[in-house]
Amino acid sequence: MENKIEISDLRVHYGDTPALNGISFDVHPNEILSIIGPAQSGKTTFLKVINRTLEFTPEATVEGSVKLDGVDIRTIGDVYGLRRRIGMVLPLPVGLPLSIYDNVAFAPRAAGLRTKSELDEIVERCLQQAALWDEVKDRLDTLGTKLSGGQQQRLTIARALSHQPEVLCLDEFSIAIDPVTTMRIEEVLKTLQKEMTILLVTNLVQQAKRLANRTAFFLNGDLIEIDTTDVIFSDNPANQATYDYVNGTFG
Amino acid sequence: MNILRKKSAANVPFSETVIETFIRLCGVSAIVFVFGIFFFVFREGAGFLFGGLDLGQFLTSPEWYPTSLSNKRYGTLALILGTFSVTALAMCIAVPFGLGAAIFVSEFCSPKLRETFKIIIELLAAIPSVVWGFIGLTLMNQLIIAVFNAPIGLTMLNGGIMLALMSVPIIVSIAEDALKAVPDSYREAAEALGATRWQVVYRVLLPAAKNGLLAAVLLGAARSIGETMAVLMATGHSVNIPSGPLSWIRTLTATIAAELGEVARGAEHYQVLFIIGILLFTITFVVNLIADLVIKGIRQDS
Ligand SMILES: Nc1ncnc2c1ncn2[C@@H]1O[C@H](COP(=O)(O)OP(=O)(O)OP(=O)(O)O)[C@@H](O)[C@H]1O
Ligand SMILES: [Mg+2]
């Protein structure tokens, strides 16, 4: 089985401050890999490396390599195409100041799709998948920014699915969502897994336990441990810090 | 709300009250000044406005012969058209340049270049309008004669270019502020969706900043309508229904500036000039009103 993503000796600095200190691991195709770890451990930074949006932070330097389907992402010329292969859901929901419809149709349009019927179909499918369709189907032309925080978060999930990514990255997606909706989206993620690889950064260790095939534990820019979720959540993971963090006795 | 305010007023320190009163006075005085100016202008023109002036002729006749002995005419149509045409021409030039420059400065240029650019824009804004008029009178005049083979270069085109150069700095700085005020998270979200930088600009930033951009354009236009000295010097200052960019024109403002010094206080001609002032007041009021309505309309959409 080929690896979907191969990370080797990845180091990131913001100016002189290290954020990732040489981490290496593989991501398997169609797995849900959750990344857990306390604040400031470099989880968000890692996701920004994957879709190359860290390039907007001028003082950030990246060393080591990240390969997507065996190709070093830094050698990919079409960075916009690369970003569309990766769906990104950021922790704070950002409804773009466009209509709900235009929010979801944004990426397909940016990629050049113009056919109304195809766009309609994408918008409906993605909103369905993000468990938002029923709430907004009658007002697709109202502004995305007018939705509630939780609805906006589901809108960003729909948007991330609109370009049919190969890898879906979610950064603490449930921060603004109520538990019931969170559960619905978790179910969606389980189905999406058949079509794509999912990287799930989460502060809720129970969410990792519920969803992930494998779990990685980050701490202060180091990868402490990566293993199947069963092992990480068992009584004897390889590292004591992992056990402490997972069981809430950390620090 | 009111109850809350009253309750807390009891234990507000004395200095707070002083500051609040002072700020309130400042606000009220601004309103008083505006009304005061309007009242003064109105009083000077009112006598003739309500006794003798043919308002229809005033607004629709192109004949402006205020000093003629046998055939006095107070028609301002040519002046109104002069003001509007030169402003429109100036906006045709200044809006694309101003907005383009603002987009460049806020989205595409390096921080170092941005600082240089801002200093240049500020310098441009600090040039007094009489200097622009002088440039129009000399340099631009020669240029238009040479390029268009025109008999004289003091035309609507000349004035329009001068006005454009004067409004560009206003448009750039306000539009740039509006673009800067768009949260970075919008840019990040759009870029994560694979948008190119241009797509980010026209799909996200322009819609998000449209109120501010509109304000920038309207303030630029207001600057043009109100400008006096430069158009007086650069447009040929002759009463004429404009027929194209190369016709010479005269504006409402320039007429007041040029003729007010030569008329006897209280004379008919003097009063008519003040009525032109009232007309300018009305025009700016309407422009502002439209701007407000447009912005409100946009708000309601969104
Ligand atoms: N734009 C930036 N400029 C400078 N330092 C940054 C920047 N972004 C992140 N950092 C630093 O990099 C380190 C890792 O941050 P990162 O956001 O990746 O952590 P995280 O694991 O996502 O934390 P959280 O759980 O709080 O979201 C932190 O020390 C942080 O202060
Ligand atoms: Mg984070």
Image (cartoon, coloured by chain):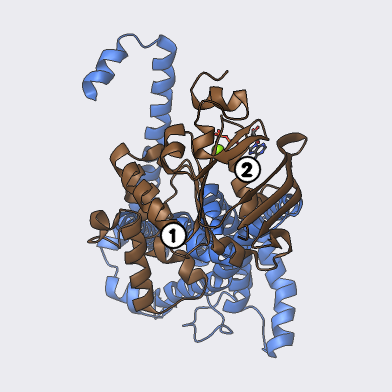
Chain colours: A brown, B blue
Q: Residues within 10 Å of mark 2 (few under 14, many from 20)?
A: some
Nearer to the camera, A126 or B126: A126
Q: Which callout, 2 or 1, points at the residue further toward the start of the chain?
A: 2
Kindly identify which residue carries mark 2. Answer: A45
Q: Residues within 10 Å of mark 1 (few under 14, many from 20)?
A: few
Percent x, y of residue A139: 25, 60
Percent x, y of residue A34: 52, 42
Q: Is residue A36 above or below residue A150?
A: above
Q: Tell me the kind of residue under disc 2.
A: Thr
Percent x, y of residue B87: 51, 70
Q: Which chain's residue wears label 2?
A: A
* Pointer 2 residue Cβ closer than 8 Å to ligand 1: yes
Kindly identify which residue carries mark 1. Answer: A194
Specify whether B142 is left or right of A149.
right
Residue at image x 68%, y 57%? A67
Q: Can residue A200 be seen in this view?
A: yes
Residue at image x 38%, y 39%? A176
Q: In this view, does A203 lie above or below B265?
A: above
Q: Is label 2 or label 1 in front?
A: 1
Label 2 secondary element: helix
Label 1 secondary element: loop
View extreme (bottom): residue: B149
Q: Tell me the kind of residue under disc 1.
A: Lys
Determine the quadrant in which ligand 1 lies.
Answer: top right
Q: In which quarter of the image is the N terminus of chain A?
A: bottom right
Residue at image x 70%, y 68%? A77
Q: Which chain's residue wears label 1?
A: A
Is disc 2 in the same subunit as disc 1?
Answer: yes
Q: Are marks 2 and 1 in contact (CB under 8 Å)?
A: no
